[in-house]
Structure formats: C-alpha cells, structure tokens
Image: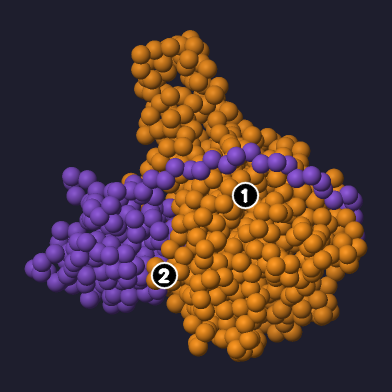
Chain colours: A purple, B orange
Amino acid sequence: MNGETRAVAVAPQRTLLEALRYDLALTGSKQGCDKGDCGACTVLARPLGAEGRGEAILACITLAADAQDLAITTIEGLASPAGLDPIQRAFADCGALQCGFCQPGMMLSARALLDKNPRPTLPQIQEALSGNLCRCTGYTKIYEAVEVAAGLRVASFRAPFQSEKAAASDSKAQTVKEIAP
Amino acid sequence: MSIGSRLAKTDGGAKADGSGIYTDDLSFPRMLHAKILRSPHAHARIRGIDVSRALACPGVIATLVGSELPARYGVIPWTHDEQALATDKVRFVGDEVACVAALDERTAQEALALIEVDYEVLPTILSAEDALAHPEIKVNEKARTGNITKHVQLEFGPVDEAVASAAAVSRQTYRYAGSTHAPIEPHCAVARVDADGNLTLWSSTQIPHYVQREVSRVLGIPQAKLRVIQPLLGGAFGGKSDPFSLEFCVAKLALKTGRPVKILFTREEVFYAHRGRHPMVMDLTVALEKDGRIAAVDDKILIDGGAYASFGMITAYYAGQLLTGPYRFGTYRFDSYRMYTNKPPCGPKRGHGSVQPRFAFEVALDEAAEKLQLDPIEVRKRNFIGEEVETVNGQKITSNGFLKCLDLVEQASGWKERHGKLGPGHGLGVAGSMYISGTAYPVYPNEMPQSGVLVKLDRSGRVTVFSGASDIGQGVNTLLCQIAAEELHCDPREVTVVAADTDLTPVDMGAYSSRVTFMNGLAAREACLKLAEKLKAAGGETFAEACQRAEAAEGAPLAATGGYRTQKLGGNYRGGTIGASPAYSFTAQVAEVEVDEETGIWKVTRIWAAHDCGKALNPTLVEGQIEGSVYMGAAEAQMEEMVYNDKGLLFGPSLLDYRIPTSLDTPLLDAYIVESNDKNGPYGAKEAGEGPLHPAIPAIANAIYDACGIRIRELPFYPQRILKLLRERGEKREGRVG
C-alpha cells in the first residue's frame, strides 16, 4: 500500500474502497457511487514484484480480499517527499480542480495513461479518462492539465476582452398589470 | 496586482494530494452510522410504524420516527411543507419514513428491513397536467388551492394588441425534461453533541446558515447551541441548497444517543433528495415588428414541482422574471403554475427557473426571425437592450457586454462564412442569455447584512479572513485571498481563510443565485479597506512590520468587518423584487453539431461561449465556471432526464442509468471572458457560475435546425426524437437564411 506492507482483517464482503477509507484511513479515495459508475475511487494496482504502478482499477467494486498481494497506489501515494507528482501539480495549477471530489480518481487514471503513453494525443486522453466522471469542469482544464504534466504544452493564458460601453435602449413598456398573484 | 491574476486555487494542494477533508472523511470515537427507511409508494397514508424489531437487533442503538421531530420546515419561510421523517403521509417513492442508528452502516441497513410500516396507498399525481386536472387528489396539504405551490400572472404592457399588429409571430409549445445535479459527492452529515449540550453538525451543504436556522427550529434548540460547519464540498450545483432529512436525523440521533452520528446517502438516495431542474411545458408566443424588434412575448408555463415546495415559489417567478434581457421586450406577459406531484421534489439546479424558458425563447426567436428572413445573430443585435436601462418588468440593468459576447462567438465560430453553408447534417446555432448576480433580498426578511466578512491581522504578518460564504468548488476562498492581497498588499499565499462555520464566521446566506463572489466579495473588500488605511498610516519595511506598528498604534488586535447590505431593487408591483439583482451577467454562444440523417444520432462537436462577468477576478476560475456551465447545459440537451414509471418509481437511480457526459460525450469548449466592469460589483465583477449554462441548449437546438431543417422543441434531444422529426420533414428542406 503506497510502498508499505499493510495487513488488515476484513469481512469477506468488505470492498477495497471501504478498507482504504475506513480501515486504513486513506480517505483520499472517494466514494461517489459505490457501484463502479463514477470512477472517483480509482486506484492503481499491480501484482507484487511487477514493474511500474500498474493499471487503474475501481476500488469500490474490488473486494479487499482480492487486493491481497497487490501493490496499490492511492492518491496519498502519488506524491513523494520531494513534492507533488507532475500530474497533481498540473491539476492544481491549471484550474482542473474545482470541487476536487472526482479528481483523486481522475489524476490516477491520468497517471496510468502517462506511465504507458508519455505523449498522448487529445483523443487518447479523452479515451483514458472516460471512466472518470467530472461534474464541475467540462473536462477542458483536465485535458490541459494532462498535457501540461506530459510536457506537451504550457498552461493556457488568454486575456479577457474589454467590452465598450453600449448605448442604453430607448424605452420600456408602459404599464404593469398584475392579474392575480 | 492580485485581482485579475490567475492565482492557483489556494485549496488546490489539499485537493491534489488527497488530504482535503470532505464530510464523509470525518470520523469520531464512538460514532454511529444511520440509515433512512424510504417509502416504496408514491402516495400513501401511514397508518402506523413499528420499529421494535429493528431496535431489538444486535448493534442497533437507536431508532427515529417522524413524531419525534414533527415540525415542518422548508428553505423558504412561506412554504414550510417538509418533515425530516413523514408522520402521516408519504408523497413520493423515496420519501423518508424512519431512521436507524447502529454501530456500523451494514447493521443499520439490515435493521431497516425489520421496520414495519402500515401504508394505505392513495391515488397518485405524476404530472403537472394531472395535478391541475385533479385538485381533489391532494399531494401536499400546504397547497391552498388544489395542487398549486404557486401561481404567478404578470403582464407588462398591452401584449394582445402588440401580437395582433406584429409582422411575424411564432407560437409553439416547448417541453423541458427534468434533470438532476448529480454532484459526484453524495450528501453526508455528521452530528456530535458535547457535554454542555452544544450540537455540532458537519454537512455537505451550500447553505450552512439556513441549515442552522431550520435544524434548530425543528429540534427545538436555540440557534446559538447549534454550530453548522461545511467541510470541503464535492459539488453541489444547487442540489445541496435545501435542508435535508439526513441533517435533522443525525442531529436528533446525536442528542438522543449522546454519540456522534453519521449518515452518508447512497447514490440512489441522492437521486431521491433531488431538487433538480423542474420539468416545464411552455406555450410561448414571440411576436416581431417588421424590423425584427420584439413586440411581444407571451409565455404560459406549467411547472412540475414534485412533492415539496423547496424553492418552488421562487421558481414560478424566475420562470418569467428572468427572461427580459439581454433583449428589449416591447410588451411581456407570463402565467406560470408550479404544481405539486408525487415525485422527488424539484428545486434550484444551476440557472434556477430560467434555463427552461430561455431554451424556449431563444428557439422561438429564431423561428420568428426566419419568417422575416433575418439572420439569427442580426436579430439578436437589433434587440439588444443596452446599458443602464430598465427592463420591461422593472429590473435595472447596469453594465452589459452582450454585444461584445455576440461579436466574439460570431468571429470565433466563423459564423458569417459557415452558418447555413456547412452542408447536410452539419450546422451552427446561436443563443444568448442573461442571469442575476445574487437576488436582491434574502429568503427570510431581515435588515441584517446578507454577507459578512471579518479580517484579522496577526503581528506575524499572517492575515486571516473569516467568511460565512460556502466554497462549493467555484473558488470563493481563493478570491478572498486575492481580495485581501489586493487591498492589504500582502502575499495571497499568506492569507488563511476560515469559512462556512456558524460559530467562527459571520453569516453569509449561502451559495445560491450566483451571489457569492458579488456579495461576499464586496463584504471582504470593505473589511480589507478599513485595515489597509491603518496599515498605510503605520508604515513599515515589511508587511509584518506594518502589522506590528499598526497594532501598536491601535493598542488592540487589528481586525475589521465588512458587510453586503441589501439594496432596494426591483419593480414596484407584487413580485417585482423577485429577479431583481444588483447586476446582470450576459452570455452568447454558438454551437456546432453534426447530425446523421439516417439514424438521428447527433453530436455537438464544439461550443464557443463568451460571457460578460463584469471583471474576471481570476480568469482561470471564471473560465472553469463557463466551461462547467456549458458542459452541464449541453448535457441536458443531449441525454439527461429523470424518468419515472406509472407508479412514480424513478427509472435507474444510478450514474450508469441516469447518464451524464463522460469526456467522450463532451464537446470542445472555447470560453471567452468579456469584461464590462460593472459599477456595483466588487472590482467590477458579476456572476459567472450559472449564466453560461443557459444558451448552450437553444444554441444546440438552433444548430440542429441549421444542420437538417428540423425544429426540436422537446428535451433531451434524443436521437429517436430527431429521427422522428427528420421523417416528418421527409426530403423537403425548408429554405434557410444566412
């Protein structure tokens, strides 16, 4: 678990997400639907001894017992003592985090993508993040953050446009009639 | 300059590394978990409830039924029509009936099955039309007449005469389906009582102050004994701006058991809590003069409200009152009914009350303009209402950057070269809109400020801003740091914001009606200006030194308060204050669609959105609000609908069955910020969080017309509906303009 060996006794039906949040106090993984629809609980998993950080999986539909002998990376394990992972840094800098609730899962899916494909195209980013629902951002700034983290671009900057003073309209209607409030 | 900078969100680090605390991340020793039993019937009388078997269950600590907290409540003081748990009647499938607190969630859930409820099933009302036709079947006893929550009828000028003498008239019926907010964080609340009987309630709410008022009233405890704290909030969009059953239940159970109690809604329960977009049927007439100017608008609106009022009284007004810009109306009439039905209650979803009529109007404007062979952008420019002007219903518009917005999206989309010329199945559409920057008045009448901020300076140079406002992801806490830095000349990263805690922070009314940046921003600026004067007088090499010298001169700790005071606004008639706002935002959008005429499957590929937010205090945050709004509007046009069967059961209350767009369903979004520098707003700012949702839907509908010559007047624009219209159209293509 994030590089440490953790042993917990769980009931057979306990999900990995419940074990993370309530047994291991790793509350960074979020519960949005508890049935594999939203992606907020996404973590990275690989068999012990395998290379890299592994695949993005949904902790809410994985039994904790099935995580035996898996190496799991949660959002808490993405940063290092040296600081945030470039994905986390870019999400914060680019305004990709609004309410932030879907983002631990989103950032881990993005990390899994960049681990496999360091220079993704926009359609590849869209495909890789399509299992993570975000309700705040319209995804636009998330794509930008992934591209920034991949070193493909710098954060966008477009200055606001000034509006010239407009003329006032000439008239308004004459009477107000309230029929029956 | 801190204002106008793209300062990264000050809570971004905590949201990026997983350390940020949302309500369900809280846990306390001895904490109990509670679950709520919900009605399986859409309408039934409760003859009796027996919780004894549940209470006898090992691990169950307490139960709760409606008679233990029977007082009625509601967010609007005139429509207190809800109970935390039903005492006599249930009014929709999912209505709350009883509650069990246990050592763990699973035990509580299993104990619910042991509660026996004796129901007498009643006839149900499942549509607004039925609610009108069957006043004898009373959904909610709070309704004075039949099933009417509110009826509003207002007329501004002689509408019938204007329609009779108009050059072009569009008269059509438009249908808007109900949709829901679907924030990714489900509602959650935790309550804890201390040894002195003080109660603390943590809740995923966007209205801590109203929650404090209603929970204390229903529980019969003084407001001063109840502290409401809003932790980080995982999305709201209006879906967390009512007091909800779980808040009352955890508070009561904490008092009853003396132990902390938590309730976390399942995703299914979030759908029953709802308060989403009202379904509306609009019979709309738009009449134009020969030159394209709007002679008359006449709208009959039937609103399906669900089982409780929520903000519905306001919805009935907003459905008409917020339509009167950015265009000048010669005359205007609306007649709206908000009805009770046996479905989960509707409420304020982003763009409360005005998204539906805006869709109808912007499509109707295109329909009428076409009869005059007028280009859709041209007809909108000709009707521009201007600045410093009063609308037909007496709302005072100050700044207005709508023309600039239209220009920007016209150019960015290549409108002149591309509209009407993209070939079969490919089109562009335009729409505009207006929205409020906060309502003129608080929901309960009082003379106190609507938003308060306290700023404290420490001799270390640390600035602390105590603000009642709710950061629901829109970033107001970051704006507060920017405002403090702007006025005090300190580093925005050395500002602490303590927010949305009724014991620690001054009152703010909550995050609704796009009021937060405007009102809380003005309050913060006022407080900071007072301190800036003292710092300036004190002088000093560094900010910390200035703080020390100012504190020495003051002879007391340095702090100042600021408030937003209610302005007298609105038309001089009953209801004239509803829809009145100190400033209005404006938006124009162009959408591009591709329609497969063989299958009806269509796709919105790109939306250009230009929004006049007055002044972008932080352009990154404003762009985020524009993009998120446009996404949510496009989502309603594409796929979102609350569907019920003939028993009132919600079809598929999950994020799989109630589809919301993934990254693959969302169009490319181009956000443009227009600054009109409003005289009333903080640094010229107006709202940005709700206005930009409105035009997305009619712009898409108008683009579908440009693509294939069909007018879709019913949401969502399902492919089967498109296909049906295409078949009705046949091979014949109507002539188009532009």
Give x and y (percent) for residue A40. Answer: 36, 65
Amino acid identity at mark 1? Phe
Q: Is residue B155 left or right of residue B521?
A: right
Indicate whether B512 appears above or below B668: above
Q: Quadrant of the C terminus of chain B?
A: bottom right
Which label lies toward us, 1 or 2? 1
**In the rendering, which numbered label is found on residue A92?**
none
Q: Which residue appears farthest toward the left when viewing the image?
A: A49
Q: Residue at x 88, y 64 (%)?
A: B165
- Label 1: few (<14), some or many (≥20) within 10 Å? many
Q: Chain of mark 2?
A: B
Report the residue at 15% width, 61% height from top.
A5
**Along the horizontal axis of the image, is A151 left or right of A155?**
left
Q: Which of these two is toward me, B144 or B160?
A: B160
Q: Residue at x 50, y 20 (%)?
A: B532
- x, y (%) of residue B686? 59, 43
Where residue B402 is drawn, which disc sits there? 1
Hey, what amino acid is under mark 2?
Thr
On the image, numbered disc 2 is attached to which residue? B662
Do pointers 1 and 2 mark residues of a single chain? yes
Q: Is residue B178 above or below residue B695?
A: below
Decide which of A60, B601 is in the foreground and name it: B601
Residue B184 location, quadrant: bottom left
Left or right of residue B350, residue A10 in this image: left
Out of A151 and B117, give the one closest to the viewer: A151
